[in-house]
Amino acid sequence: MTDKTDLLLKCIDCGDDFFTEGERDFYLSKDLHMPKRCKPCRGKKKARFKQEKERIEFEKALAASPYKYIEKSNLLKTEPDTSLFIIGNGFDLMHGVKSSYYSFRDTLGKNNSLRFALETYLNVEDLWADFEDALAHIDRDAMFGVVDMWLDDFDAYNPDAQAADFFAAVDTATGPSQTITQDLPRRFRMWVESLKVPDLSFRPLIDVISNSKTLNFNYTEFIEDLYGVDKENICYIHGCRRKVKYQQKEKLILGHVPGAGDTGSVGDYRLPKHKSGYKRYMMEAAVETAARNLSWYDDETTKYSKDIIKGHQEFFDELSNVSQIIVIGHSLSPVDWDYFKEIISVNQKKQDVEWYFSCHSPRNIESIKVFSGAMGIEAEQITLFIT
C-alpha cells in the first residue's frame, strides 16, 4: 500500500518537495493539470499578479486624471516658512505601523463585548472600513424593539413597580450604546499607545518632509521620531498619545460629523399594535427615554470640528502665508473637511496655493476629485506624487 504522505513533485520556484499521492488522485479524478508550484509559491505568484494588475489600473487612472503627477523623488524641497504638511493615517501605515481600524478590531478579540456592540448595532456594511462615520449609524430600531421585552423582564409594567425598574429596563435595552461610549475611549487609547514603528531606519519621505508647520491627524508622534519635525511645529488636531510627566493624558478625539446620526428622536418607529392602555403608555415613555439615551450616545460620538478648530485657532491663523500644502496619507473623508476649509479661509492667496497629494491607487484619485470640488481647488493647483 502506498504511503499517502509521499511527496511526489518539486516546486519549480523554490525547489521544495510538495504534493501527496492522495492529492494526486484528487487532481486526476477531476481531470486537472498537476500543479507546478507549492502552495506558498502559488500564493506569492497570485499576489504578484494582483500587484501588477493594480499597477496597470493605477497608471490608467493617472493618465485619465486632470492632475499633474510626479514621483516623490521629484518633489521639490519645501520652504519651511511657506509650507504646510497634512498627515493622515496613511503616513503611519506607509511606515509599517499596524494602525488600521481592522488592526484595532483584531486587538479586541472575537468575544469582546465592545466588538460585539460595534459589529451588531452599527448599521453599516463594513464598519471598520470607515469607522468614524460608522459610529453615526447605530441601529436605534433594534434597541427600541427590545424595550417591551425588558419592561416585561424587569416587571416594569406592574403598576406597583419602582421607577428604578423602568429605568433599568430602558438602560438594558440601550446597553450597547453605553458599552460603546464607555469602553471605546479606553480600549482605543490602549491600542494607540501600543503602536510602534517596526523599523526606525525606514524613512521613505526623507527628501520630502521638512521641519514645517504640520497638521497631524494621527495620535502618534512618529513624524517627530522619523523626520525630526519639532514638536512646536505640529498641531495634533485630535490629540496625541504622548505621556507627559505629572500631566493628565490628552483626550484622543474620535467621531463622526455633527448631524450624521439620527438618534435623538423616535422618528418612524412604530409601537406594537397589540399594546394598549397602561402598557402602551409605559412603552411609549420607555421608547422616548431610550431615544434620549441615544441622543447622549450621538453627542459622545460626534467630532465637533468647529470647536476643535477654535481650540487651535492660533495654529490655523499662522497659515495665512502658506503657498504649498503637502497632504500625505489622509483619506480626505468629509469628517475632516472643516479643518481644510479653515486652512483655505485663512489663506491670503488661496487661488495661488499649490496642493500636493500623496497617491497610490485609483481610489485616492477619486477622493481627490470629490475633495477638490468641495473645496473649490482648481485642477491646475494640484499635483499628485506617487508613494
Image (spheres, grey):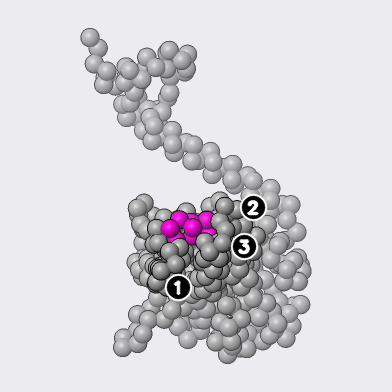
Q: Nearer the viewer, residue 260 or 366?
A: 260
Asked if one can make out residue 298 in the rendered structure from this viewpoint, the answer is: no
Instruction: List x then y, in percent, for residue 88.
Output: 53, 68
In the rendered structure, find residue 256 and report the number of the disc placed on it: none
Instruction: List x then y, in percent, for residue 43.
Output: 44, 36
Instruction: List x then y, in percent, for residue 92.
Output: 46, 65
Residue type at mark 1: give it: Tyr
Question: Would residue 379 be found to the left or right of residue 365 on screen?
Answer: right
Instruction: List x then y, in percent, for residue 382.
Output: 70, 67
Residue type at mark 2: give it: Pro
Q: Residue at x 37, y 17 (%)?
A: 24
Examine the image and state in which quarter residue 245 appears. Answer: bottom left
* Magenta region: 144-152
Q: Is residue 19 above or below residue 369?
A: above
Examine the image and state in which quarter residue 323 appears. Answer: bottom right
Q: Name the quadrant of the N terminus.
A: top left
- Please, what is the dominant secondary structure of the magenta stretch? helix
Q: Residue at x 44, y 38 (%)?
A: 44
Which residue is label 3 attached to?
385
Q: Is residue 215 above or below residue 268?
A: below
Q: Is residue 250 above or below residue 286?
A: below
Residues at badges 3 and 2 in contact (C-beta under 8 Å)?
no
Callout 2 crowding tier (Cα within 10 Å): few <14, some 14–19, many ≥20: some
Query: Does 146 lie within the magenta span?
Result: yes
Which residue is label 2 attached to?
362
Which residue is label 1 attached to?
219
Asked if one can make out residue 342 in the rendered structure from this viewpoint, the answer is: yes
Question: Can you tell which of label 3 and label 1 is closer to the viewer?
Answer: 1
Q: Residue at x 35, y 57 (%)?
A: 112
Q: Nearer the viewer, residue 308 or 112?
A: 112
Residue type at mark 3: give it: Phe
Q: Name the N-terminal-most of marks 3 and 2.
A: 2
